[in-house]
Image: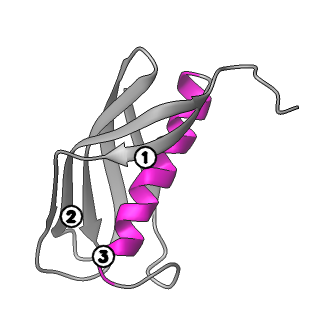
Amino acid sequence: DVFGAELSSEAGPGGVAGPVDAVHQALAAFADRRVGWLGLPVGASRWEALPGGAPVRLAGRARQAGSALAADVAAWDAEGRLVLRGAGVRLRAARAAGAVDA
């Protein structure tokens, strides 16, 4: 399944931290909408920051395996240059679908 997001270059921490956080947030929103659970980031196989401007758009392809979700993602700057790649970005279910906090 494919997901994506538009990013604000003004929001969040600078450098790579902001875009990596944005990827995790987009993937968590995807998990909520598509598989029905709250997901928390647990790692990635690889992150690669490339030269260019601040990322303004990201896209990825996610796959579910039980109570985990993994995705390969990419982010581009305003000039259309690829500036960030993530492989095996992972979330795990923190709460089952329909669960309510006591």
Q: Callout 1 environment at 10 Å: few (<14), some (14 to 19), or many (20+)? A: many
Task: State the residue at coordinates (41%, 47%).
Answer: 4
Amino acid type for the residue under numbered disc 3: Ala
Left or right, residue 36 beside residue 68: right
Q: How far apart are the alpha carbons under marks 2 and 1?
A: 17 Å
Dot 1: element: strand
Image quadrant in which the N terminus is located: top left
Task: State the residue at coordinates (82%, 33%).
Answer: 101
Q: Callout 2 environment at 10 Å: few (<14), some (14 to 19), or many (20+)? A: many
Residue 34, x across and y down, in percent: 54, 25
Left or right, residue 46 beside residue 66: left
The answer to which image quadrant residue 87 occupies is: top left
- Give the answer, above or below, for where 23 lies relative to 78: above
In the rendered structure, which segment of residues is drawn in magenta? 15-35
Q: Callout 3 environment at 10 Å: few (<14), some (14 to 19), or many (20+)? A: few
> Total label count?
3
Q: Taken as a whole, is the magenta stretch helix, strand or loop?
A: helix
Residue behind mark 1: 41
Circle on res. 78? 3
Left or right, residue 45 beside residue 18: left
The answer to which image quadrant residue 51 occupies is: bottom left
Residue behind mark 2: 84
Amino acid type for the residue under numbered disc 2: Leu
